[in-house]
Amino acid sequence: MEISYLTDAASMLLRWLHLIVGIAWIGSSFYFVWLDNSLKPPTNPKLKEDGVGGELWAMHGGGFYNPQKYAVAPKHLPEDLHFFFWPSYTTWITGFLLISTLYYFQAATYMVDPAISSVTPYQSIGIGIGTLVLGWIVYDQLARLLIERSQLVFAIIYVAFVTGVSYVLCHLIAGRAAYIHVGAMIATTMSANVFFWIIPAQRKQVAAMKRGEEVDPILGKRAKQRSYHNNYLTLPVLFAMISNHYASTYNHAHAWLVLILIMLGSVLIRHFFNLRHKGENRWEYPIVGMAIILAVLVWIAPKPTTALAGKPVPTLAEIAAIAQTRCTGCHAEKPTIMPVAQMGIMLDTPARIKQYAQRMNERAFVLKNMPLANITQMTDEERAKIGAWFAAGGK
């Protein structure tokens, strides 16, 4: 069995599992933040006496639910207490295995872009892993120093840090890898929050109750602060994770700024929902957030280009020769670079080239995101020929 096929199969299974456990983690995170923001002080004297600080009546799937949150802790530790941590841990583990399979084991293809910098594959791997570690250290130190003093100051400095990381990565490694690693850095921080702060705080609370001691309220407060940070970081991470499908973002001359602006817009939208759960309808936040994202999309839209103005229209034979040299390694009945024809697109015969003329023009000429990482070194002149041939009818 070919190693390329094994890599492809492993990435498929890991991506699928990563998506499943990620949905579980994000779903529980969103639910509990919504729950916290939606709780109302109890009216039942018995609940107040028991230490309940808020409750909510809800209906789902035909059933009535009455979740309650204690101001600090219940009087007695329940026998069956559920902790939410495995969705976070498995999301990070599968994510790291996936990034290793797709990027680190194939660094020469996915991490390195000679047009950006001269880093070697091994150096690019070190940059990637170092980014994950550095991201957590900087975030955690900033949080320790600032979140008790000013959440706003913390947010401004952290955004500046992420912006700096985005700028540096986009000037060291391939744009696609840079975006993924910014997202992975933030996701690592989120999972580290669970591992180093949220779960330890919960275990200390339980241990105190088992010893018959009062539970320190600061434990829950600090854990909840980190949980809220995770909530705001979720949408930026999700965009970074899907960005590899949208080369117009990570291939832009100012890709780092494109990424930061889209992430900022998503945070504003998330902030609107968090406020709305508390009964505040601050519509300026989603309006500004969407305006930022739409403005970025307009800004990065490919500009009309005149391909080979004044020169003869390239023939199908010329385009077939370009495809044979630059494209069939990934797009052929029997490709040589990938295990199977990617996206099911084959460009190994004139008939197939005509069939996929529009896709070929979009990817090679307009968006310039194919070949992937320009692994086969397609030239600007060859791209212009494809554009001119398609503009003339693609025949």
Image (cartoon, rainbow, N blue to C red):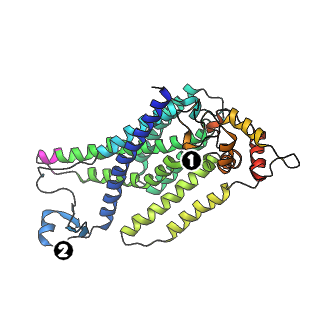
What element does badge 2 sit on?
loop
Q: Which mark is residue 163?
A: 1
Most foreground residue, 346 or 382: 346
Q: Quadrant of residue 386?
A: top right
Q: Give the number of the disc on residue 43.
A: 2
Q: Quarter of the image holding residue 280?
A: bottom left
Quadrant of res 244: top right
Neighbor class of circle 1 (other Cα within 10 Å; few <14, some 14-19, many 20+) is: some
| Residue at left offset 66%, top offset 29% | 118
Magenta region: 207-215
User: In the image, which disc is placed on residue 379?
Assistant: none
In percent of width and height, residue 323 lies at 69, 37
Q: Find the distance from the CA under tag 2 to the CA under tag 1.
A: 47 Å
Locate residue 28, reporting x and y percent.
32, 54
Q: Which residue is farthest right?
A: 310
What is the three-letter code of the residue carrying label 2? Answer: Thr
Q: Is residue 96 above or below residue 71?
A: above
173 sits to left or right of 202:
right
- Residue drawn at the location 47% of the way across and 41% of the way down: 185
Judged left or right of residue 149, residue 348 is right
On the rendered structure, is 275 left or right of 49?
right
Q: Is residue 216 visible?
A: yes
